[in-house]
Amino acid sequence: MCAALTHPVNTQGWGGRGRDETDRQTERERERERERDLGACIQTGWVQTLGPSQAGFGKVGRSGELSAWSGPSCSQRHEQRRVRRPASLTLWDEEDFQGRRCRLLSDCANASERGALRRVRSVKVENSAWVAYEYPDFQGQQFILEKGDYPCCGAWSGSSGHHSNQLLSFRPVLCANHRDSCVTLFEGENFQGCKFELSDDYPSLPSMGWASKDVGSLKVNSGAWVAYQYPGYRGYQYVLEQDRHSGEFHTYSEFSTQAHTRQLQSIRRVQH
């Protein structure tokens, strides 16, 4: 009678090696997915940071350094918020983007001194919104410059009550937030009289219930606004920001260095 041949059971045999290979393959797939997410985040200025004690986000600075940021997944952060790029615009001393040019990234009190421009006759706004003034040191009539091309003075003057064929000082509007803007108008100076709180664009304040043609004072609670002398966003422009005068404009003369009247009949949020 022959004895049956038996083999010892290998509990770590082919089945164990198969599980190990499956685990390694799964880990490689996860790594590739993390790399894809990382690439998507880098394009928007954010990268995912994975450490032994936390998973979150870091912001890539201009120098390439990474600063800590905790938050949801990369795809969720990409959908919820896009990083605002630094303010920038380019000036030319001739119309249609011709002649000598100068690029600005921050306040410029006199373009003729900084960029050796005799005058500014055309502008291209790459990022953020800017306020331009017809004279040095942020004096004279204001003109709001939002992202886009301004090939000649008519492009920034529009239907303004004042036309300027040159611009000489510029500064970015840093507090603009189109989704979260609020302003309260008051009929009298020093926040007295009837008031009207706005959080949307109003091409005609009288037709929306504001009984007077005048605004004596106002408070910018959030964001930045540009107000106009007449309905339909026409006439003199007044750029009103939450981080200027602490958002409180006690009299119409604080609206602008060139505010000649209390008349204010249309207002809108600044685009950024």
Image (spheres, rainbow, N blue to C red):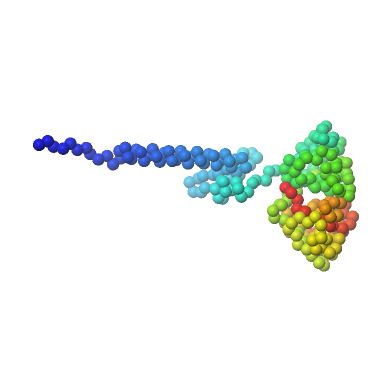
Quadrant location, the N terminus: top left
Q: Nearer the viewer, residue 77 or 5?
A: 5
Q: Which residue extends farthest left?
A: 1
Horizontally, is 233 left or right of 36 in the view?
Answer: right
Q: Is residue 105 visible?
A: no
Q: Which residue extends farthest front?
A: 207
Q: Residue at x 51, y 41 (%)?
A: 33
Q: Which residue extends farthest bottom?
A: 193
Q: Residue at x 85, y 42 (%)?
A: 154
Q: Position of residue 227 (x, y in %)?
A: 81, 54
Q: Is residue 99 visible?
A: yes
Horizontally, is 236 left or right of 85 in the view?
Answer: right
Q: Position of residue 67 (x, y in %)?
A: 59, 45
Say above or below: 193 vs 55: below
Horizontally, is 75 left or right of 235 in the view?
Answer: left
Q: Nearer the viewer, residue 214 or 117?
A: 214
Q: Residue at x 51, y 44 (%)?
A: 50
Horizontally, is 33 left or right of 247 in the view?
Answer: left
- What count of labels does the image hold? 0
**For residue 112, which quarter of the picture?**
top right
Q: Position of residue 16 (x, y in %)?
A: 33, 40
Say above or below: 189 vs 71: below
Q: Residue at x 41, y 39 (%)?
A: 24
Q: Position of residue 166 (x, y in %)?
A: 87, 41
